[in-house]
Image (cartoon, rainbow, N blue to C red):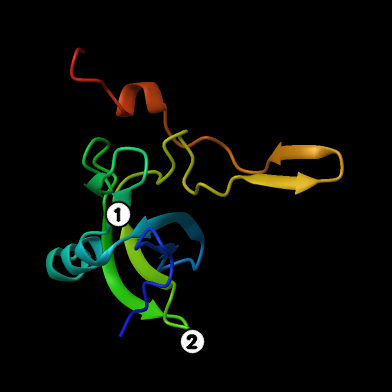
């Protein structure tokens, strides 16, 4: 059984691309997001800023199709292996949200942008 040990009732969920093993992103899930993820086969998170559920790809179309869900030894973190629809997972236009390397000199982008986020994430006014 998954342990919701933190006061906010959320657990971290690491999303890994099944085919490459690349870490695509980290999000947070509550029990409802986990249930929806398992029943729909689409990765669903709990947005801490909006205080509501959201399914990855609702706006961009870059959906994450669940292939396997694992829980860590303490049962307080998830690893979700998924297949990605679209060129990227990151709202800044990269395949992975982990596109920067941190060094003593600062941050450095180590991957190229895959898509233009301004064209992908449109507001309802456009």
User: Whole-Å distance between the Cαs marked 1 and 2?
Assistant: 21 Å
**Which of these two is toward me, 47 or 102?**
47
Q: Residue at x 44, y 72 (%)?
A: 77
Position of the C terminus by quadrant: top left
Q: Position of residue 90 (x, y in %)?
A: 44, 42
Residue 7, quarter of picture? bottom left
Q: Are marks 1 and 2 in contact (CB under 8 Å)?
A: no
Q: Position of residue 86 (x, y in %)?
A: 32, 45
Q: Is residue 33 above or below residue 73?
A: above
Mark toward the start of the polypeptide (1 vs 2): 1
Q: Is residue 74 above or below residue 5?
A: below
Tag 2 residue? 73
Q: Residue at x 79, y 38 (%)?
A: 106
Tag 1 residue? 45
Q: Position of residue 42 (x, y in %)?
A: 21, 59
Q: Is residue 67 left or right of residue 25?
A: left
**Which of these two is toward me, 53 or 102?**
53
Q: Residue at x 86, y 39 (%)?
A: 105
**Which of these two is toward me, 100 or 55?**
55
**Which of these two is toward me, 3 or 7?**
7
């Amino acid at each position: 059984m998954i342990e919701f040990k933190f006061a906010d009732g959320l657990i971290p969920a690491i999303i890994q691309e099944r085919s490459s093993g690349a870490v695509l992103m980290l999000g947070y899930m509550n029990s409802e997001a986990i249930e929806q993820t398992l029943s729909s086969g689409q990765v669903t998170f709990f947005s801490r800023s909006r205080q509501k559920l959201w399914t990855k790809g609702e706006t961009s179309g870059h959906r994450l199709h669940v292939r396997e869900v694992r829980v860590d030894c303490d049962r307080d973190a998830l690893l979700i292996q998924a297949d990605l629809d679209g060129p990227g997972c990151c709202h800044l236009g990269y395949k992975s949200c982990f596109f920067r390397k941190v060094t003593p000199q600062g941050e450095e982008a180590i991957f190229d942008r895959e898509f233009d986020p301004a064209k992908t994430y449109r507001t309802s006014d456009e």
